[in-house]
Image (tube, rainbow, N blue to C red):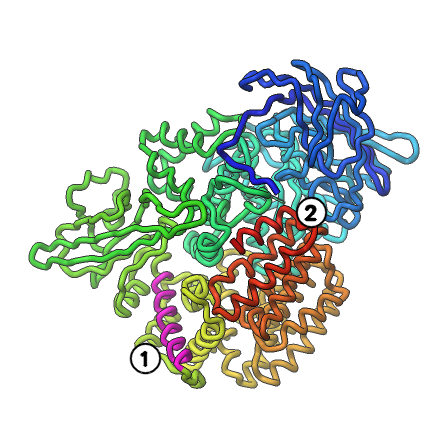
Amino acid sequence: PKTIYLKDYQVPDYLVKTTDLRFEIYDGETIVSAMLDLYRNPAATTAATQLRLHGADLELISISLDDKVLTPADYEFGEESLTLFNTPETFKLLTITKIKPEANTSLEGLYRSRTMYCTQCEAEGFRKITYYLDRPDVMSEFTTTVVADKKYPVLLSNGNLLEQGELDNNRHYAIWHDPFKKPAYLFALVAGDLAHIEDSFTTCSGREVALKIFVEPKDLDKCDHAMTSLKNSMRWDEEVYGREYDLNIFMIVAVDDFNMGAMENKGLNIFNTSCVLAKPETTTDAGFQRVEGVVAHEYFHNWSGNRVTCRDWFQLSLKEGFTVYRDAEFSADMGSRTVKRVEGVTLLRTLQFAEDAGPMAHPIRPESYIEISNFYTMTVYEKGAEIIRMLATLLGKDNFRKGTDLYFDRHDGQAVTTEDFVAALADASGRDLTQFKRWYSQAGTPRLEVTDHYDEDAQEYRLTFKQSCPATPECQHKLPFHIPVAMGLLGSAGDLPLYLKDAEPDFETSDNTYKVLELTQAEQSFVFQRVQEKPVPSLLRGFSAPVKLHYHYSRADLVLLMSRDSDGFNRWEASQQLGLAAIYTAMQHYQQGGDLSGWVLDADLIEAYRSVLQDESLDQAMVAYMLSLPSEAYLSELAEVVDVEAIHYSRLAVRKALAHALRDEFVRIYNAYNHQQAYRVTADAIASRSLKNVALAYLILLNDETLIRACEQQYRTSNNMTDVMAALTQLVNSESSLGQGLAENALADFYQRWQHESLVVNQWLMVQASCSLPNTLAKVKALLEHPGFDGKNPNKIRALIASFCNSNAINFHANAGAGYQFLADQIIQLNRQNPQIASRLLTPLTKWKKYNSQQQTLMKAELERIMAEPQLSKDVFEVVSKSLA
Ligand code: HT7
Ligand code: ZN
């Protein structure tokens, strides 16, 4: 397969003024007529006389240019292309093609999901619908006619509805017009027998917008949360970014078969059901929060992505990084800012840092790709959002807003680059962001080594930062990054005032206990004056940059930070550092052949955790997070060589030790919050449930009959899925025979009760696939044959196969490679059926270099087996070949 390079970018030879589409949907096939009004691009360097259109899996029925029917002499088919010869300066091109949505298992282009037809065109799916210039810098005004049998009463496309009516043969039609020029990847169409809820929103300029959420009729009772989230998002974008919605109608459609979370098609967002449906009985708190976040994310794309789009797919982070930043800030404003930051950083530090250290590492603006679908990554999305966050930190609130205003004004209706984005921010703020742009072109996670020196006589405190960045596939030697380090200094009584030597007085903030230091060199020092005691530095507050920070904190320092830091994020971070140290001590013991049963922790450590439990000033959600030890995934990311068993058993031993030592506190907390109340989805209510369930997870480790029965009672009597799933998870993972017996009954009961709710069945699959007890692989294999599983549905594949391989290290890496072989078999099967999903499943195998030599050999052998498959998709080929390189 061919590699595409950013350096080879060329403007398109032709542009499309208008695109008129007509879809005739019949059982088994759809006829697509496309009338394109084309003109030579005035910006092209030479006057082209050929037009190369993209097209894949299409049957061409006819093609005419300015009413003249073309013959095969006038054109040529290539791989995914159709080239027309002797094309004039301007012309109208009419193509008629036949496609087969029912046979489309890739879920790109037009396909059938259960009872409806729907589309997914990003990134390059439109070429599976008709021949087109399927690239984001070709923007056109679309009019779409959808014709179908009346058994599909709802016919939708982008923009505003122009007309609808009846036709012969029990058929009907709808015509939609989108007045905003858009690239083909934002095209959407839906036809189905759908129910909807409806609301309206009055924009800041007083325009009335109809809001509709379409779902299968059985799901109509699960749309309210998405609607509330949508209205909150619309208001927030007006207030925080000055962005108003622009069409008369905004629609969301929920689809059960979907490769990703959702898609921001202009005026017609299409959502994975898992990201739009929610009600307390079927959806966990995390599910509710996901709906809120994804609804906001897709809505925010209307400006950051649709009105201003990407010039080419190398610029993907222009819209995705920025929009993730916007949705994270929205969620922070809707709930608890610190909690949202802890969750965001946890995701980044486990999954994105691992990606940045592996064979698929790439800068947020990659230089090359084989298959662009492989670059919808944690790096482009999550690290991309961190880059925007750093810009916001460096510019300050007002300048950042001036910058985004300028960006939207300057580039409305255009397809632009990340350079254009940074230029707008630089121009609006007057800041030089030249060095900052290295974040766009250099991959890898920078490492910050921090040392300090306190001069008691001079009352001066010096902090020295050394930055470095490991080599990544595209670059061996990195230039220093521009890194904002938000910080403060703690004395025995809390935050100290900061007097930075040689610094300009800080006009922007009245808070003199908080500073943003700007690192631009490989090594840099900062001296603070009038420091009356040796301080403990609170560094990288709010995780102000996506780096790995190393400073040698003593346990006493961490206890101080955990209890006194004014920065909530760093309080949590200190708790994690304490937890890490405790796990490392146990790991050392285990790796030297020691026994971890009855493992105990130092008394001062126990007291530190006890004080968190007793700290009334803390948000309960933060208490829950501070008591949760670093995950196995994070421990693996930090390890040079991952010792799967040592990580699993040491972490478990520390958890058991905490459970024994703090039993009374956990019981008190569990009882205090375990009362049936009407379910509410407020931040406070979510926090209480989360803390109670963290306490339960500790208590269940004690293997105490009363506590196990309490857990089972919680499973049976709770009125919401959060508490039901929390209890079920603990029973399923319980090592006691009582717990195992109760788990078996509960699992049977759960399926019996929820078998008709596909999303709930997915949670049932997930809890079993993630069980850390032995023999889980056999259970997972058996579940592949269960009626609750469907090998064509991405959500089911993620729930069962991906959960086992990504969230169950102790089982995935056990049994002499049986887990690896299982995964490779699944990937080989999916390679042709759904290449995007097959490729995404590969991730755990790509990490083979981080394991011991025996595991390496076994994992590599499976990658080689996949590589030897005939007809490997571009998606799978790219990831496997880069992993083996
Ligand atoms: N912009 C959307 C990307 C997306 C996608 C990409 C590849 C294949 C399938 C896909 N479905 C949606 C989602 C978003 O980030 O908003
Ligand atoms: Zn997005």
Residue, far top: 89
Across and down, in percent, residue 598 comes to: 43, 85
- 64 part of magenta stretch: no
Residue, far right: 169
How would you rate the neighbour count of disc 1 (Cα within 10 Å): few for under 14, some for 14-19, many for 20 or more?
few
Residue to which mark 1 is pinned: 603
State whether residue 379 is above or below residue 813. Answer: above
Gap in angstroms between the C-alphas marked 2 and 1: 52 Å
Q: Are marks 2 and 1 in contact (CB under 8 Å)?
A: no
Amino acid carrying label 2: it is Ala
Of residues 145 and 236, the one nearer the viewer is: 145
Residue to which mark 2 is pinned: 254
Q: Secondary structure at mark 1?
A: helix
Ligand 2 occupies quarter: top right
Determine whether the beta carbon of the residue marked 2 sits less than 8 angstroms from the nearest atom of ligand 1: no
What residue lies at 64% left-to-right and 40% top-to-bottom?
Answer: 269
What residue lies at 17% left-to-right and 53% top-to-bottom?
Answer: 462
State whether residue 97 is above or below residue 295. Answer: above
Question: Majority secondary structure of the magenta segment?
Answer: helix
Across and down, in percent, residue 303 comes to: 53, 33
Residue 624 visible in the shown view = no
Across and down, in percent, residue 395 comes to: 34, 37
- 580 part of magenta stretch: yes
Q: Secondary structure at mark 2?
A: strand
Looking at the rendering, which quadrant does residue 612 occupy? bottom left
Amino acid carrying label 1: it is Ala
Residue 878 visible in the shown view = yes
Across and down, in percent, residue 512 comes to: 23, 47
How would you rate the neighbour count of disc 2 (Cα within 10 Å): few for under 14, some for 14-19, many for 20 or more?
many
Magenta region, residue range: 573-592
Q: Earlier in the sequence, mark 2 or mark 1?
A: 2
